[in-house]
Structures are given as C-alpha cells and as structure tokens.
Image (cartoon, helix red, strand yellow):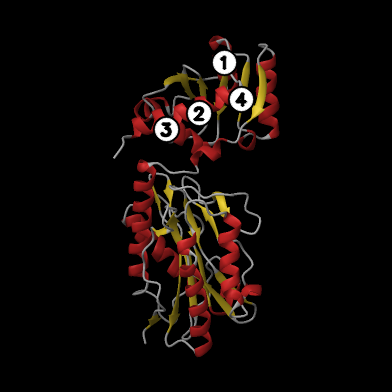
C-alpha cells in the first residue's frame, strides 16, 4: 500500500504536467476536495499555490498546525488579512507571471478580487483549469478507502433489514442507517439518505419522510458512507412482507439489467454505450420509458464525479481504476418503483462491484 505522502508526490507531478502543458508558471487550487487530493490537508478556507518547483499551503491560524501534520510536502503560510491578499503576495514573491485557477471553484466576485490583486502585481490570471479530471482514475490508496466506505455501507444494509417492519417511518429507517454507519466509522452520510416506500418509490430522489411503511410496500434505500473523505453509494430495494407477482416482475427486470451491464463496465467502453445497453434490456420488459436517469456516475472525494454512464456521457473510453455506479431503476407514477445500485470498479475484464450486499429480492417478515 502506498503512503499518503507518496500519493501526494504523484499528484503534484500530475499537476505540474498540467502547468507545463498549459505554459503556466503556477496554479491556485481552492476547491475543498482538491485541496485534500493534492496536499492531504482536510480543511477549508485555504489555497494551494503550486509552481514547477514550489508548493505552498496558505491558511489561517485555525488550520496551521493541522496543515503542518497533514501536508508535509507543502510550506504552510499563515494568512491574517485575507486569503486572496496573501495568495497574491506569495505569487508575487515567487516571481510568476502566468497563473491558472479553478474556474468552477471560484464565485464571480472571488474571481474578480483575485484577478485585480494579481493584475496590480503584473501577474495574469490566465487559464480556468478543470483539475477534477485528474481525480477520475483512483490510485491504490484511494481504492482502499473506497472499499472501506463500501464495507461500512454493506454492514449497514445487513443491519437495516432487521429493523424495517410495518409502522416504522422512513425517517426512522434513514436515521438507523446513518447511525449504524457512524458507529462503523463513517464520517457522515455520503448525501441526504433516500428512503422511499410504497407509491413514493416512483420518485427517484424521494428523501425520507414521516410516512409509515406498510405491509406489501417496496422500500428503496439509497445511501452511502464516507471514509477518510471517500464516498460509497449503494441502493437496495426490499419488500415488506410477501411481494406481489407484479413486484417480482419489476424487481427481476431491474436486477437482470443491473447485472447484465456489469461485464460492459470495462476498459475501453464508452459511457453512452453502457447506459444504452441497460435501457435496451429494460425495453424487453416495456420498462425503458420508466427509466429516466443515467445509469451511473463516478464516486470518490465527491459523491457525483465524472465520468458518467448516460445518454449524454462525454466519456469515450472508461479506464481501469475508475469507480462508477451501476444503478438502473424503474419508477411508475401512482404505483411505486425500485432501484438497485452498486459502486463498481472498472477493470480490463468488466466491472467489479465494491458494494456486495445481497441483491436477490428480500421479503422482510415473510
């Protein structure tokens, strides 16, 4: 297993390759997850300044000790009168002239402020860079953290099926899932936990309510754990009591679709073709019109990352080491719906599910 320091060394190397390719002297990193990725530091209100030879971490006195411990490859610079003022001063002292920045991470007002501070020092804020692309392929250390986040989510599923019963509210299910994951080492939920029972299952992102679960309901749970900053994402649907024939038919169609595309989530496949294969399989059951979202998205330091599996995916070729969800679902207004999802590692031989909870239809209390 590589160390965090070795991982950061490699990431700095990738960042400096971007500087050379874009003919820049430096880059300013401000997106919180990218602060973590490129330095190891886990705070906010901070900027990284990386040149071809130097690496500075600029923060305030709340974080200077923490930064010294978490980002040993960076010189920690304390700011007291404004982050961007100190950043501009540091860039001037470094003698740089062309600076890149993360356009998607700065508000318009922040961009104007930084641009003026730099122009006053004859430094040009030149290129808006998409540094997120450097995070698409996960390294060995990241994969270990993602596997742990998935293990926590799996353990929470094993526990929640013992808790669900008629009369329990969706909110209670969500709280129980989140508390279990916390006790197992999750820092926080990956996102607002989705629990949708009965006819509410027709809403793909129906967050938990005070609705009481009824006998005969499908209960869809979409949730995840965060371990050392890395997110897992899993969806399982269970039936409370005996499932009807129609519920069994729907479940079979979604599970078959979810499993049928796993071999396609491999090196060289395009995001669009994998999604279209899932839609084609649902079409055999006259259900494709009830599948209105993309098949999947990447996960990592953020819950929704690139690349994606969707009709509009820009990914022409999946790469080994990407981690992406496989989450087909069907949603029938006035009836309900279901979804089955795994976080999946892209390999040369097909997708490897990192979430491993049982996917056969569970009929609780039957």
Residue tagged by mark 1? 91
Residue tagged by mark 2? 15
Q: Identify the residue at image location x=54%, y=11%.
A: 94
The x and y percentages for residue 66 are: 38, 29
Q: Earlier in the sequence, mark 2 or mark 4?
A: 2
The x and y percentages for residue 8 are: 40, 31
> Which element type, helix, strand or loop, lies under badge 1?
helix
Task: Count neighbours of disc 2 (C-alpha within 10 A) and say few if under 14, some if 14 to 19, many if 20 or more.
Answer: many
CB under 8 Å between callouts 3 and 4? no
CB under 8 Å between callouts 2 and 4? no
> Which element type, helix, strand or loop, lies under badge 2?
helix
Residue 40, by quadrant, is top left
Q: Identify the residue at image location x=51%, y=58%.
A: 192
CB under 8 Å between callouts 3 and 2? no
Q: Identify the residue at image location x=41%, y=30%.
A: 10
Residue tagged by mark 4? 22
Q: Earlier in the sequence, mark 1 or mark 4?
A: 4
Compute the Cα span from label 1 to label 4. 18 Å
């Amino acid at each position: 297993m590589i160390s965090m320091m070795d991982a950061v060394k490699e990431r700095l190397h990738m960042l400096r390759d971007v500087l050379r390719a874009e003919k820049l002297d430096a880059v300013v990193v401000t997106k919180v997850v990218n602060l973590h990725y490129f330095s190891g530091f886990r705070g906010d209100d901070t900027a990284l300044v990386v040149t071809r030879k130097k690496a500075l971490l600029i923060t305030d006195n709340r974080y200077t000790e923490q930064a010294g411990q978490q980002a040993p490859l960076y010189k920690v610079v304390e700011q007291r009168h404004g982050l961007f003022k100190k950043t501009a001063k540091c860039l001037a002292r470094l003698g740089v002239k062309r600076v890149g920045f993360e356009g998607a991470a700065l508000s318009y007002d922040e961009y104007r402020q930084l641009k003026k501070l730099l122009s006053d020092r004859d430094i040009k804020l030149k290129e808006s860079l998409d540094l997120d692309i450097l995070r698409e392929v996960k390294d060995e250390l990241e994969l270990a953290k993602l596997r742990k986040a998935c293990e926590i989510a799996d353990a929470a599923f094993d526990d929640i099926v013992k808790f669900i019963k008629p009369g329990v509210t969706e909110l209670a299910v969500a709280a129980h899932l989140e508390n279990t994951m916390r006790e197992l080492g999750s820092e926080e939920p990956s996102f607002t936990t989705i629990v949708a029972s009965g006819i509410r299952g027709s809403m793909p992102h129906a967050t938990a309510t005070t609705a009481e679960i009824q006998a005969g309901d499908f209960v869809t749970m979409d949730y995840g754990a965060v371990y050392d900053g890395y997110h897992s994402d899993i969806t399982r649907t269970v039936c409370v009591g005996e499932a009807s024939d129609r519920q069994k038919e729907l479940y079979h169609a979604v599970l078959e679709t979810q499993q049928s595309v796993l071999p396609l989530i491999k090196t060289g496949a395009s995001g669009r073709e994998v999604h279209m294969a899932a839609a084609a399989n649902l079409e055999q059951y006259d259900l494709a019109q009830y599948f209105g979202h993309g098949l999947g998205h990447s996960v990592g330091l953020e819950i929704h990352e690139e690349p994606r599996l969707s009709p509009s995916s820009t990914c022409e070729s999946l790469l080994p080491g990407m981690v992406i969800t496989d989450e087909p679902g069907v949603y029938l207004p006035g009836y309900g719906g279901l979804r089955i999802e795994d976080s999946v590692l892209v390999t040369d031989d097909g997708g490897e599910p990192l979430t491993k909870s049982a996917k056969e239809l569970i009929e609780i209390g039957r």
